[in-house]
Amino acid sequence: MKSPLIAMRDDRTSLLEILGRVSSEDDLLAEVAILTEQTSGANSCNYFILDHADALVLRGSNVAPELCNRFRVGKGKGISGVVVQSGEPLFLNSGVEDHPKYVHFPGIDECKYEAIAVIPLQITDQPLFGVVALKWVEPRSFSSRCKATLIKQANYVSATIKGFEKAYNAGAQMNRLGALSEVAKIITSSPYLEEILQLLVNLTAQQFNYKVCTVRLLDEERQELVLRATQAPAKAYQRKRAIKLGESIAGKAIAENRPIIVPDVAIEDDYIGHDLAAEQGLKSMICIPLSLQEKPVGVISCYTAEVHDFGDDEIAALETLAKQAAFAIEHAKLQVRDTLMQEMHHRVKNNLQQVASLMRLQLRHGQYKSLEEALNDTLARILAIASVHDLLSREDLDHVDIRSIVESLVQHQLRSLILPDKTINFKICGDYVKLNMNQGTQVALVINELILNSVEHGFHRANEGDVHITIEEREGDVSLWVSNNGDQLPAGFDPAIYSHLGLQIVENLTGALGGKFKLNNILGWTVAEVKFPIITSE
């Protein structure tokens, strides 16, 4: 070890040089650990900084740099914990591993150490914020002068860390204000909801250096938060399920209308999706509610790759951004509604033309025994289209949910078309899948025909049974199954040869959707399957 005066002089000079070249606190602590080891003559130098839970996190090390930000010492544990609690430095000349509070840490303590010096990191009149732990493999005598030198060196380092932190936070605040201004300006300039949400997650992640950013919007009818945008590349992340308001961190943020911070999602019991978070390397998380005049709109969730302390200025910036985003989202919805009103007469015209085409098919087919039967089929097809318009006015303005379409059509069947002597039970299950209006109208007609086919042909002789309707979405493809356990298909039935008007409509519309249609007997059930790709834009 150099003489105390030379060591202190070199230490101060080197600290200034380090400050001139580092760009983050982690870089600063990494270089300071090496510098301290060199000037003190210690064999091991580890800098531990207190986190929000008063645990000591390894932030700088000359022996195990790969464990920085990954290794923690619990509150009050080890000799370092003793120093944190007492606030006084501790020096042991020898036999450190025999000390009752000494804890051996695999990966860090690969040598057998004899002497140790653990010194608090703090500046005058402010709380202790960490410790530096120095170890020697040989016994040594800590003179009063040597102790004073090590303490002064620790004080210089403490002042350097806090000075850098203050300057960095000031710069970060300016950066965040700039980022906030940039993101807010861009998202408020777009009139399209999907574009706003995607811009919001992309720009927030980029400007604030988050690994993953997501937006969930509130489905008020189901009281669920539905994932609508994320910049995460993993497809598994993009398919995360909807969550109820009463569950998970995002649900809590909405329910309490305040930001919720999770220091480490891997160990948070209320967090949903630990496996995916571990796979994506996610650590800290903040959920900010999106609300407009106290009305909840959704939540934006931001994740970091390392354990991160979200500072007050960062939280304030995100809250301001969330308010801007909520306003932009509601404004976009109003614009979409206005645009739809302007275009509605075109859509009504197109749908009336579709009804006219269907009626011409009925006239050419000529299979009806009575006018009432023909009118009932026509009525059902018109109501299928009407259900899409009804849902459009109540749901997402420009998107409709398949399951909601099915529920509406089944209710109409139960009210109007099932004969009194028939007992048919309907069961609907599967995913909630959003479609744009054009695709939603075609799918509504397909489902309507399949339900009609199940009721009319599946229960022509049978008087009771079940109709099951299942919806499944996988990697951008939707599969629909309409199954009944009534009358079986005739042996050798070929839809291409023996199909009636309803099945011809299904075949034509499925082809227009870019999909495929199959009809088979499976284990005593007649199963109609339609599979098609989701079109993400009109």
Image: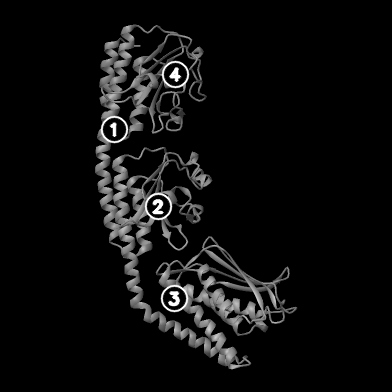
Q: Residue furthest right?
A: 491
Residue 510 makes an appearance in the image? no
Residue position marked by numbered label 4 in the rendering: 79
On residue 165, the disc is 1
Please state which of residues 146 and 407 is positioned toward the viewer in this rendering.
407
Q: Secondary structure under badge 3? A: helix
Q: What is the number of the mark on residue 254? A: 2
In percent of width and height, residue 206 lies at 35, 49
Left or right placement of residue 120 versus residue 530 in this view: left
Q: For mark 4, does the 10 Å Cα neighbourhood hold few (<14), some (14 to 19), or many (20 or more) residues?
A: some
**Label 1 to label 2: alpha-carbon separation:** 32 Å
Say which element carries label 4: helix
Foreground tag (2 vs 4):
2
Question: Residue at coordinates 37% horizontally, 22% vertically from top-left?
Answer: 131
SS for dot 1: helix
Which residue position is annotated with label 3? Answer: 389
